[in-house]
Image (spheres, coloured by chain):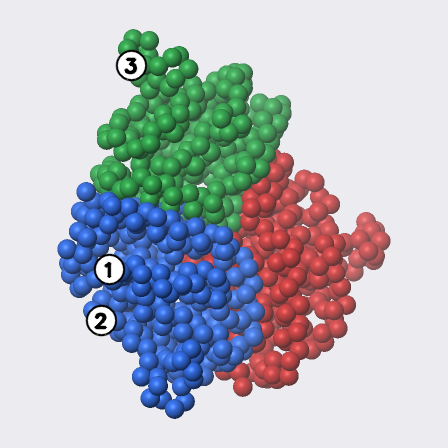
Chain colours: A blue, B red, C green
């Protein structure tokens, strides 16, 4: 699509108009909204990662932007989890990003370090890489009635690759981080709020308006004040690079084992990556698929 | 006033009797109470910082002291925020303190490192530097019905200078710290407790008695046990010096800009530093004054 | 007893059958349960530490184990606190463990670093070293109606020796850690949950079943996924060795003082180490015994 647009840049330049898995709404020069829209359940694929990388290019080149809100077009799924599309080569082909880290990690790192406020407005399910995404955002607000968060990876015999190991400890403390990661079960809204997994809950019918009000407020603030204040918190609370590259290597190694490949096949047979009962209750049901 | 008292030391020695913005009540040799009393709304001025620095001199010279409780004579304002009194020279003239850091930072650092337990007994508003003060105390208890906390600085286009960026992360975690600092809005008691911004709430009519009971208990404890136990927690949780000096320099740089000077003038025209509706709702209303 | 069993190893090998203060139930190869049973109130003695050290030997030699749940045979006392048995030599004779640290610290460090999930299923009182034990576990679940936690050590004039100073900050943050350690009072279940001192409360009549369900889930997971994921969180959240050895030295120095020895004698006269009213309310009543 981008080639049809006279104002689009060279093929290497970001072209939000061509994105197929997310939509960019520039509400104001200082306030953008990004909506995940990848039917049927907002899985994260290589294509989505490529588009998110382009989004970071756009964000980093924009000196006026203050705040980006992320939401979902699907009220049941914010971001389901990663889908390798039965082809590890697709993800491998993404290579490394500007930070020198693999594309998914690179995106999370650039988002968390960007001089803008990123807000996850969570409605529906965000598990695995979907949870890693919300943990890399600066702020997390969630529907009181309709939120499920979880890191189910240990339940499929792997290490969570996007380093929630490094981020959760700085957000919820050691004890609750270990429970989220090791018990690997679903967290509903109230428990997520209790643990600090999200900043706080907002009644579902108020979520969009309240997040919009916060973003509109941030949109009026001075950019440098936001950027510098965030950078001081970053210095204290962002993981070091060395904490981020180990988990993804472990994920690859552990996932390649025959037992994990077989479990993955069983998950797919039960409806993984579709709006199935398995996906609705993945945190609880993952244990069924262990041999 | 100090010259009237035969037991007062040389002019360089601390003389609590001469203080005009705070009162020191030595309830017991091991338990002191400091009451902020600077009409009309307990702003923090160069004079108050100078008196607080003297307070630290007194505290550091006293080997018996175990606990200091800070409260306010004004039930609506614990410590409103910093007031530069339209004369940046007054604050600049305070220079640096014994730590080598600017006077306000120096005071906060000495308080947080002192071998005594500092307790903020919060009733009313504590914003900006007032919030920085409570964050530098060891323990924070707040009126359930009558507490407002906030770091509104980003709303006036500056970095919070007293390094709540460094302290909040160790108290409430990354996500909630970023919200407090960047959204820069008011937090009432229940939300402050939920976020861990205060240790916990106490019913307003029980606040004074319960804090007094805790302080009276601490007053009986062994001084070395308190001092050494605190120092071990300090090793893990206090900011490094390098985290503390950047924000105050940024504050000065950003505040000196014409846009920020103009916004400050608008705030003053609307009643800043007086018991105005603006001050009552500063976190919410600050956005009105952005050009 | 171990000499009666043909499959027991040499006298230096661990022999769980001979333990007198704890019981080991190997429910599954991947899921063990350890029950504290040292009448009358589950104090931690040199004997119990020796048995816990042997438990770590057994755990570390078992490549299949995923999860260990710790509970108590006494519903009023999970682990009361340390009992020196009027003979400091008994504890001193334990020497140092494989980490090179004194036996109690060594046990806590090995437990927290082990490649298995340790779960404290808390019913009753856990104070002092009992609280240090639960803080060294990975996960803490507690009876809603019947839990009391506390670090009363500062109330007897000493530094808590098992380094809760280092662990609490990573679990509950600076402010609440300082209150737990310095005010040194009892925390009931609801306040412990509010502060993050435990992961969360479970209704007493559901506690055993819910913890068993979590452990049974963990028992089915892949061992390497658990071990590696935990190790990444450990890198960020476990204390450095240098944070662990200071407090125990301070404990010994401060406890040896005449005033502390006299206070300890008064505590014993009031019923310390027995199921007395003093023990039931130790956090509150400790202040009565200060001269």
Q: Is residue A203 above or below residue C140?
A: below
What residue do we see at 37% from left, 65% from top? A94
Q: Are marks 1 and 3 in contact (CB under 8 Å)?
A: no
Q: State which mark lies toward you, 1 or 3.
A: 1
Q: Residue C268 in the image: x percent, y percent?
A: 48, 21
Q: Is residue C33 left or right of residue C110?
A: left
Q: Position of residue B232 (x, y in %)?
A: 58, 41
- Quote the CA–CA distance across marks 2 and 1: 17 Å
Residue C141, percent from left and from top: 33, 41
Q: Which residue is mark 2?
A: A39
Give the Cα distance between marks 3 and 2.
60 Å
Can you see residue A39? yes
* Label of residue C7 in the image: 3
Q: Nearer the viewer, residue A250 or C134?
A: A250
According to the picture, the residue beneath numbered tag 1 turns out to be A86
Residue, x 55% and y 59% (percent of image)?
A235
């Amino acid at each position: 699509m981008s080639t049809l647009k006279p104002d689009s840049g060279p093929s290497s330049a970001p072209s939000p108009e061509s994105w197929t898995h997310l939509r960019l709404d520039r509400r104001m020069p200082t306030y953008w909204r990004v909506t995940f829209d990848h039917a049927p359940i907002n899985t994260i694929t290589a294509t989505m990662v490529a588009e998110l990388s382009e989004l970071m290019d756009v964000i980093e080149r924009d000196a006026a932007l203050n705040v980006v809100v992320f939401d979902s077009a699907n009220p049941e799924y914010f971001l389901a989890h990663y889908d390798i599309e039965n082809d590890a080569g697709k993800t491998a082909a993404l290579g490394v990003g500007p930070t020198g880290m693999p594309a998914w990690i690179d995106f999370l790192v650039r988002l968390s370090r960007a001089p803008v406020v990123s807000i996850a407005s969570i409605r529906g399910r965000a598990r695995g890489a979907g949870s890693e995404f919300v943990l890399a955002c600066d702020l997390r607000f969630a529907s009181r009635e309709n939120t499920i968060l979880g890191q189910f990876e240990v339940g499929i015999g792997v290490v969570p690759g996007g380093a929630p190991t490094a981020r959760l400890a700085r957000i919820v403390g050691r004890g609750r981080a270990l429970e989220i990661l090791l018990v690997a079960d679903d967290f509903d809204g109230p428990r997520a709020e209790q643990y600090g997994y999200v900043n706080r809950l907002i009644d579902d019918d108020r979520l969009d308006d309240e997040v919009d009000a916060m973003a509109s407020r941030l949109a009026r603030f001075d950019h440098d004040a936001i950027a510098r204040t965030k950078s001081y918190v970053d210095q204290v609370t962002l993981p070091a690079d060395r904490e981020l590259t180990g988990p993804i290597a472990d994920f690859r190694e552990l996932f390649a084992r025959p037992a994990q490949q077989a479990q993955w096949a069983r998950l797919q047979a039960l409806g993984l990556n579709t709006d199935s009962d398995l996906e609705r209750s993945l945190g609880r049901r993952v244990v069924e698929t262990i041999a």
